[in-house]
Amino acid sequence: MILTTIDSVPGMHIVEHFGTVNGSTVRTKHIGVVMVAWIKSFFGGELRGYTKLLQETHAQALERMVQQAESLGANAVVSVRFATSSIAHGAAELFAYGTAVRVE
Amino acid sequence: MDALFQIIWFGCFLIVMYFLGGYLERIHYKSIEKREKELLYFLTAAEEFIPRDRTVVQSFFVTGSVVISIDYFKRVLAALRSLIGGRMLAYESLLDRARREATLRLKEKAHLQGAHMVVSLRLETASINKKKIQASIGTIECIAYGTALILDQPLSSSAT
């Protein structure tokens, strides 16, 4: 599966469009990570537990989007975008969307 | 008397946070500047830009993300600042650090995977630690994502 943020796949031609596909996820960490992050937030700096949470979140959102694209018979997703929102405290919500296409 | 002790204790706490937070921020800025210099030749573009004299061998998706918090002193400072209005320097440096760090991570990742440039770079931010009280927001998450390109021959500094 090829993913790009531009509207084509360089060096290949789009032969078929399947419309938009999306994948969304809401993930949170266990209380230990939240406590460590809370203490760390007094000193400032990077909160590694949350960074890891964020990485897992966008990996999962992308994975779901890819699954949806695969079920349609696509082999690439172009114009991939991420959107974020805030529902719950301490949770990361991410929404990935793009256009499923078949390239050759 | 108790109230006085509390104020003194809070003051000491703020002073400690001021020095510790400032020190950690300076270290972070130094590391950002150093890595930015190392990756200066690695081209990123916010639009779809493919050099005319190169052909793309392969393209793939890269992301870089970071969650950064400001220290307690700056949070108090920002809360006070919001009473007067004006530039919130404390938050400006937070946003600056988060975006630069996320972009750097994306560049490092793309570089490790053998890419020569990143096009159509997008930055997305949100707040994980959002509380109901407006003044307590001091954590920002930043995601940088884009399309990494592997070219048939590397870009020389003159070509850019």
Image: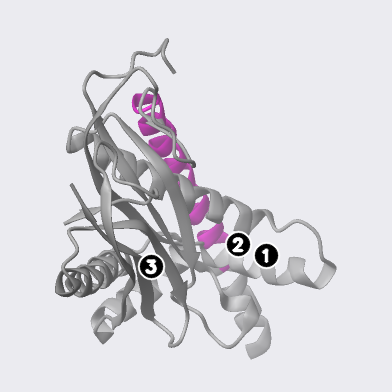
Looking at the rendering, the stretch of residues picked out in magenta corresponds to B14-40
Q: Which element is circle 3 on?
A: helix
- What residue is disc 2 on? B74
Q: Amino acid at mark 2?
A: Lys
Image quarter where the N terminus of chain B lies is bottom right
Give the left or right position of residue B143, taking residue B125 as reference.
Answer: left
Q: Where residue B28 sits in the image (x, y, percent)?
A: 42, 44
The answer to if A15 sits in the magenta stretch is no
Q: Which residue is mark 1?
A: B77
Estimate how packed mark 1 is, as few (under 14), some (14 to 19) or many (20 or more) residues with alpha carbons within 10 Å. some
Tell me, yes or no, whether the two marked residues, 1 and 3, touch with CB atoms within 8 Å. Answer: no
Instruction: Identify the amino acid type marked 1.
Output: Leu
Residue at 31% in and 53% down: B63
Residue B59: percent from left, percent from top: 24, 41
- How far across and how far down the image is residue B30, in percent? 43, 35
Residue B33 sits inside the magenta stretch: yes
Q: Residue at x 39, y 30 (%)?
A: B50
Q: Is residue B78 left or right of residue B40?
A: right
The quadrant in which residue A44 appears is bottom left
Q: Do residues under tags 1 and 2 come within 8 Å of each other at their CB atoms? A: yes
Residue that carries the numbered disc 3 in the rendered image:
A40
Q: Chain of mark 2?
A: B
Are the residues under marks 3 and 2 on the same chain?
Answer: no
* Residue B24 visible to an observer of this rendering: no
Q: Taken as a whole, is the magenta stretch helix, strand or loop?
A: helix
